[in-house]
Amino acid sequence: VYARLARVQKAIAMASVGLQILGIFLALIGWIGDIVICALPMWKVTAFIGNNIVTAQTFWEGLWMNCVMQSTGQMQCKVYDSMLALPQDLQAARALVIISILVAVIGVLLSVAGGKCTNCIEDEEAKSKVAIASGVFFLVSGVLCLIPVSWSANTVIRDFYNPLLMDTQRRELGASLFIGWGSAGLMLIGGALLCCQCPKREESRYSAKYSAPRSTAYRAQVMASTGLQILGIFLAIIGCLGDVVICALPMWKVTAFIGNNIVTAQTFWEGLWMNCVMQSTGQMQCKVYDSMLALPQDLQAARALVIISILVAVIGILLSVAGGKCTNCIEDEEAKSKVAIASGVFFLVSGVLCLIPVSWSANTVIRDFYNPLLTDAQRRELGASLFIGWGSAGLMLIGGALLCCRCPLREERGYSAKYSAPNGGAYV
């Protein structure tokens, strides 16, 4: 009977851990979608086709800018000149979406501290309360994301059926609204799952535990080791985020060219996937590369190396979570330490893969800049992506090195009591 009861309790505990992990995962996906709709200028979309189908244009409206996509593939964006000139729904959406993202960040931090797979908090009852608090934050974040999305959708639908508006003034529901609904739903579901995890009070009667005394030096060594490991993971994650930024940001090579009239000043940007032209008026026009083979060799190699670097860093993050000293995904301390070292190796490889294309492109820019055969209009300068890439590679290398330096502590193995029978010939 007791064995069956123990198996049932273990199954319930495993199901509770699974539901909590599922809730955190859904809430994280919803939080990422919340960030996407904040940046993506596709809240309201108008598809207008003129008399000639070649002049087809698609107008996008977002929280921070509006864009025009030509049928030729060119895109021109402009940041809003005035916030007060925006419709009321977009004004409110700016504030609510930003607050929703910040509230979700707090929920993410609390979910990590209150997770059943972590040991940041020793008291199980307090850990459960922290997990419930993270669920509440996710619920609030989901509601704050749902309100502006639904408000903007209602405005679009109401204007679409308004007989006083012309066809060119009508808007359609953009992709950001659908992503926003999905993100809000995921955060609400994830928050609800986290709030349903109640603390178990059955084991409170058997709170008496015994642990072998440990020296103050040993505890200090453990705390220092944990702190260095957390620092290494934090630096590596920041480096991974920078790696993602340089992959998307079209500022690897920059040319600032001023014509005869200063009003026609233009800034040319070149990235891995597109090139952009920023006018002095604030308008930006971007175009995706038509052919990959037409790109310079450094940008062709950078595409593959940066993407591989991001994927390797993601694997390193997953391993660092499993091998972290603040988690209990792996019970064996020695195996956990080996997993942490493996995550450090992945971060080191990712840093090297990020450093190679950035340095290669920088070398190409510097060599062309001092080439006397090129005109001033053909010279390039180091873009912001290169500096971000150097910093990201450095952070991943430092973080990986810190993780690789953490060896398992072996103090407890020195006190293993052994007994051997006395030899008969030596006994008197």
Image (cartoon, helix red, strand yellow):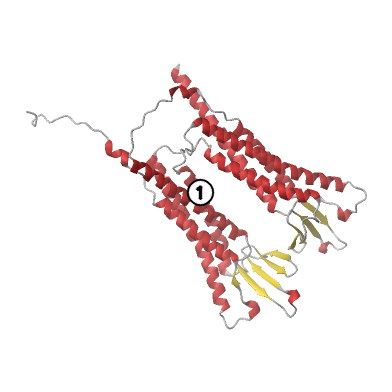
At 36% from the left and 31% from the top, the residue drawn is 211
Q: Is residue 198 left or right of residue 425?
A: right
Figure check: 99 above or below 389? above
Residue 166: percent from left, percent from top: 90, 54
Residue at the extreme front: 216
Name the residue located 27 percent from the left edge and 35 percent from the top edge: 416
Residue positioned 44% across, 18% down in the render? 2
Judge left or right: residue 209 versus residue 199: left
Res 331 visible:
yes
* Vertical comparison of 8 with 289: above or below: above
Residue 145 appears left or right of 427? right
Residue, far top: 1
Q: Name the residue at 39% across, 38% down.
A: 332
Instruction: Choose between 342 and 283: the one closer to the eye.
Output: 283
The disc labelled 1 sits on which kind of residue? Ile
Q: Residue 327 at what x, y percent from top left?
A: 47, 40
Q: Is residue 328 above or below residue 200?
A: below
- What is the secondary structure assignment of the residue under circle 1? helix
Q: The N terminus lies in which quarter of the figure? A: top left
Q: Which residue is mark 1?
A: 317
Residue farthest along the left direction in this orientation: 428
Q: Nearer the viewer, residue 165 or 167?
A: 165
